Image (cartoon, helix red, strand yellow):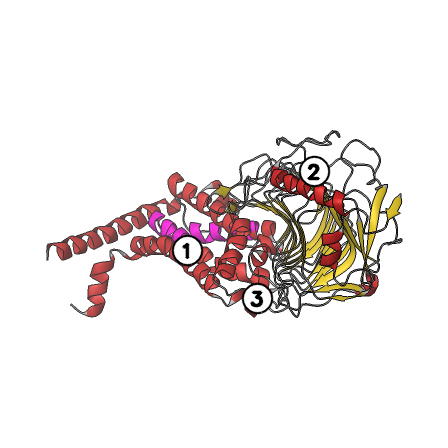
Amino acid sequence: MVPHDETEHYSRRDVLRTVGAGGLVGGGVQFAYDGEGDDGAGGDYPPGQPDRGPPRDYEDYTVHRVPESFDTIQAAVDAAGPRDLVLVGPGVYREAVTVSETDRLTIRGTSRNDVVLDGEFEREDAFLVTADGVVLENMTARHYTRNAFFWTGVEGYRGSFLTAHNNRLYGVYAFDSVHGRFDNSYASGHTDSGFYVGQCEPCHALVENVRAEHNAVGYSGTNAGGYLTVRDSVWRNNMGGVVPNSLDTEANPPQDSVRIEGNLVESNHDADAPDSAFGYAAFGTGINVAGGRNNVVVDNTVRDHANFGIVAVPMVDANLYEPSNNRFEGNTVSGSGRADLALGEPQAGGNEFVDNEAGSARPARLNGGFSLLAGDPWVTLVLIEQFLQLELGASPRGDWQTAPEPPFDELEGMADPERAPREAVRRNGGGGS
Amino acid sequence: MAGEAADAEEFADAEESADAEESADGAGRGDESFLDGILPLFDHTHDTLTTGLVVVFAAVLGLLAGWLTADFGVRTPVFVVAAVGTGYLLYAQPTGRAVLAAGLYSLAALLAVGPFLYELGLVVNVDSPLGHVLSLADLVLFLVFWTVAAVPALVANRLARGPFLPRLRARLGS
């Protein structure tokens, strides 16, 4: 690694800005990952992102320090070139940062809890990223009227050691983007979801070791699937927990092929969580496959939900999306108010509940054995009634501005914030984890 | 006027029909079944069609009751109790018509309590239940269930008590 003075790359950066703009235009183009699929469930792409090697260090980069060399993060971003590192020191930064022209940039805080971007309930996004391969690490964003960390239309993205709280819409958010990863991050107090991966197929993305609390939905993945894994994370005290879903308002419905594995999903029935769009429809559900197909839900611990622990239901938008060919296996589900395992009617068949440890099910014997019903209309009724209540504006909800703050002392930062910047995700080979 | 005459005639026919069935059932009282010989639950027996109707209703009502209460983990015992209980009550009816009417009344009653059971399933599992159950959406739910329940209830009422209009007019004294 060869860190440089921050002034010596201006001409190169200007050239690469043009390349970056070209990359932005081509952002919707997807290319195949050369890893192997793991457990295809019948979709066009397997659910589950194969393990990739760790992202590789950039060897030639410049460090741009804020506030030592630049007063604002945006100024440092504007001065940076591809593969550079914008290193932000402790402080409250009252700004909204846009990264639209510099690919493969890393913006990193030196202290996760002490580097804070504050929207003051006026600015829209803490970070709006439309350049490819941009990495955001080790900082906190709060009080924005849209999103905290937002990538859209990019190839390559990563958010690590991020804290997003009390922003109006989403916490850590990737839309129409591929080849990405969220890890070691926290999100609370959002009226849509804490973590969101939407409108991508295949996504080639991984969400792991994150934690979402007091959001309308912990994880939402609208029309997102194919090489997509959500694993080893904690989804707690949201209105709804983990909700892959199909909607006509985004491209490529229905949602298809996500792997949800090894998560702790508990007590997602927080009626005081903020909500604006979707949360109450999923109220009291742990893992809720809403109109999705070919998903694999395995080895999760799901407990203490007012309605259903693990459920698959039809999704009604401009079209009706019936869940189909989803596999729920090896999950431990307990303490659900209505049923630990549930499958709503109508459903399009092929939904399998196998070897789950659960105390109750709707319809009966969903987890094995003869059942009179393939799906249970009561399950759908519950969620339709809640959706109607939400639509009528009569559902309970809290205020995103006053939702509980994160447990900062539990949120670990990067071990070495001064380390070299790395690529967003490793895309060409590289085994291991 | 012609309509009134038709309704009155239909009412009379219904009563005659019910009397005739009751008479037929009464005639069978002397022919005790094997079950009655062992366990004399009833002082009458029904023909095969009526007995089948009782069985079907008992099964349907048991399944419905079990379905409505599945949120509380009592699906199987409720099915057994509801099926046996309604089977007994229905078989105790004197005529096939009365069996049908009682079965439909039972169906309507179960549907009517459906939204209460629905709400109860959430009320017992959340901290502040009123915000969840006192909304327009809940009112719509009740109206839907009760509208559906009204159908078998009205059919049962018609079967049990005859046409509506003559009775209504009799009540009104016209």
**Left or right of residue A172, residue B164 in this image:** left
Q: Is residue A122 above or below residue A10?
A: below
Chain designation of label 3? A
Q: Residues within 10 Å of mark 1 (few under 14, many from 20)?
A: many
Q: Which residue is mark 2?
A: A204
Q: Residues within 10 Å of mark 3 (few under 14, many from 20)?
A: some
Magenta stretch: includes residue B96: yes
Mark sitting earlier along the chain (2/3): 2
Picture quadrant where residue A53 is located: top right
Majority SS type along the magenta span: helix
How far apart in space, not on screen, are marks 2 and 3 (Cα)? 36 Å
Chain designation of label 1? B
Q: Which residue is mark 1?
A: B108
* Image x and y of residue A295, in percent: 64, 39
Residue range highlighted in magenta: B79-104
Quarter in which the C terminus of chain A is drawn: top right
Q: Are marks 2 and 3 on the same chain?
A: yes
Q: Are marks 2 and 1 on the same chain?
A: no
Amino acid residing under circle 3: Pro
* Image x and y of residue A369, in percent: 64, 37
Q: Which residue is mark 3?
A: A396
Q: Nearer the viewer, residue B26 or A369?
A: A369
User: Mark 3 and mark 2 in contact (Cβ < 8 Å)?
Assistant: no
How far apart in space, not on screen, are marks 3 and 1 (Cα)? 32 Å
Quarter in which the N terminus of chain A is drawn: top right
